[in-house]
Amino acid sequence: MEDTVGAFVPHGLFEVNGASDGPLAGLTFAAKDIIDVAGHVTGCGNPDWLRTHAPATATASSIRSCLDAGATLVGKTVTEELATGLTGENIHYGTPRNVNAPGRVAGGSSSGSAAAVAAGLVDFALGSDTGGSVRSPASFCGVYGIRPSYGRVPMDGVMPLAPGLDVVGWFARNPDVLDRVSRTILQGPEGKPDCGRFLVASDVMGLLDSRTSQALMDAVAEIEGLLGPAEGIAVVGDAAPSKGLASWAEIARTICGAEGWAAHGAWIEAEKPVFGSGVAARFAARARVTAEAAARANAARDAIADYLDDLLKEGAVLALPAAPGVAPEIGGSDADIEPFRAANEPIGSVSGLGRLPQIVLPMAVLDGLPLGLGLTAAAGNDEMLLGIASALYNAGAIPDRENEHE
C-alpha cells in the first residue's frame, strides 16, 4: 500500500496479519494512533508522547477482534494531538488529504482513518469519537461512519480523552463492510425493535445555515420512502432536562474538560509538550474545570440520557446533522475555525450525552462537497441503524462511491 494522502503516521507503517479466515477475511484496515498494538508505541498525535511512552504490551480488544475475524491491519493513522480537535490538522504529522473535498480538511480528530477509507487505501478504519471525532470526518470525507452505543465496544488499550464520553467507532465506503465490522466488534445487549417514529431534530437543524439544512432535509425526504413521514421535534424541548442546546454543549464540554485533564494533566505539566495552539488552549481550559462543576455536569448527563432513551423508545429514529456544514478549507486560523467548532459542540452533544449510537450516511452534497446525515436511536439499537443504512443503499437512496478512488 502506498500512502497517497498522508493518512498514516511515520511510526505507524507496519502490518499485522489477521486470521486465515473469518467474517472479515480479505479486508484491510487501519487504526487511529490512540489505539494500542502490541510491540509498537502509540503516538497519540504528538512526538513528545511518542518519546515518553513505551511500546504497548497488548493489542486493544477492538483491533484484536478485527484481526481474529480475518482482517489485516496495515498501519496507524494520523490524529489530532491527544484526540483533540475538529479539523484533523496536525502540526507535527501534517493534514491528511480529503480526496472527496480537495483543499478541505478530512476532519478530526480521526482524520487519517477517514481519509484512508475515502481514498480506498483500506476497506475500513477504526477511529474514536468523544464529541464528534468519527461523525465529522465521515461527513467531511463522504464515507459511512458509526459512533456505537456507549459501552458496546471495549475501551482497553485506547488512550482516554473523556472516559465518560469516549467510544471507538469506524469508517467504511459501503454499508456491507460497516455492518460486518460492527457485528465483529459490538458487544453487550442488542436492541431488536422494528423501526418506529421517524423524527427530525428541528432545533439542531436550526443551528445550520439554510442551504446546509435544506441539503440535509432533501436527504431526509429520501429516507421517508423507507421509514414514513418525518416528524419535526425539538430535542431539547419543554420536557428536556437542562434547557437549551447551549446548555447541553456546556455539560459535554465540562465532562470532557474534567476527565481530559484528569487523564493527561500530570503528563502535560511534567513534560510540557509542544502542542498546536488550538490543542494547547483547550487543555488550558480543561485545567480550570472544578470538581463541583464536573459533578453537576455528570448528574445532568444522567438525566439527559434517561430523557433521550424515553424519547427514542420503541424503535424511534432521529435525524440530525453529523457536522455543522461541509469541510472547512485547510489552513484556517483558530479564529477562523472557532465559529464552526462552537456550532459543532451542541450537534455532537446529543448522542454523546445520551450514550446513543449514531450512524453517518453520505447522502448529501453541497457545492460539490460531501455532507453527511446522522441517524441516531436509543442506546443498544446500533443494529437497527445499520439495517436502515443497508436498506437505503440497496434502494439506491445513497450513491455507490465504493470504487471511486481505488
Image: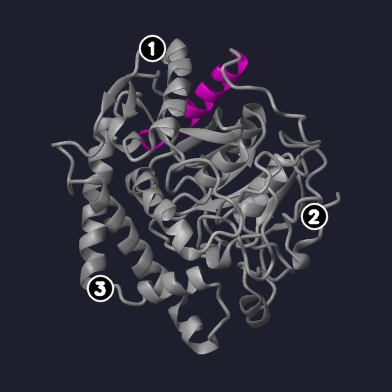
Q: Position of residue 353 (x, y in %)?
A: 33, 49
In this view, the residue farthest toward the left is 238
Image height of 272 relative to 114, above or below = below
User: What is the CA distance from the residue labelled 3 to the residue labelled 1?
Assistant: 46 Å
Q: Residue at x 73, y 39 (%)?
A: 123
Label drawn at residue 16: 2
Position of 267 with respect to 297 (left or right) is right
Position of 217 with respect to 236 (left or right) is right
Q: Does the segment drawn in magenta span residue 391?
A: yes
Q: Secondary structure at mark 3?
A: helix
Q: Which residue is mark 1?
A: 228
Please state which amino acid type lies under the numbered disc 3.
Ala
Image height of 21 relative to 91, above or below = above
Label drawn at residue 76: none
Which numbered disc, 3 or 1, marks the residue closer to the eye?
Answer: 1
Decide which of tag 3 and tag 1 comes sooner along the chain. 1
Q: Does the segment drawn in magenta span residue 57?
A: no
Decide which of tag 1 and tag 2 comes sooner along the chain. 2
Q: Secondary structure at mark 1?
A: loop
Which quadrant of the structure image shows residue 183? top right
Q: Position of residue 263 (x, y in %)?
A: 44, 72
Q: Position of residue 153 (x, y in %)?
A: 51, 48
Please state which amino acid type lies under the numbered disc 2.
Val
**Total marks drawn?**
3
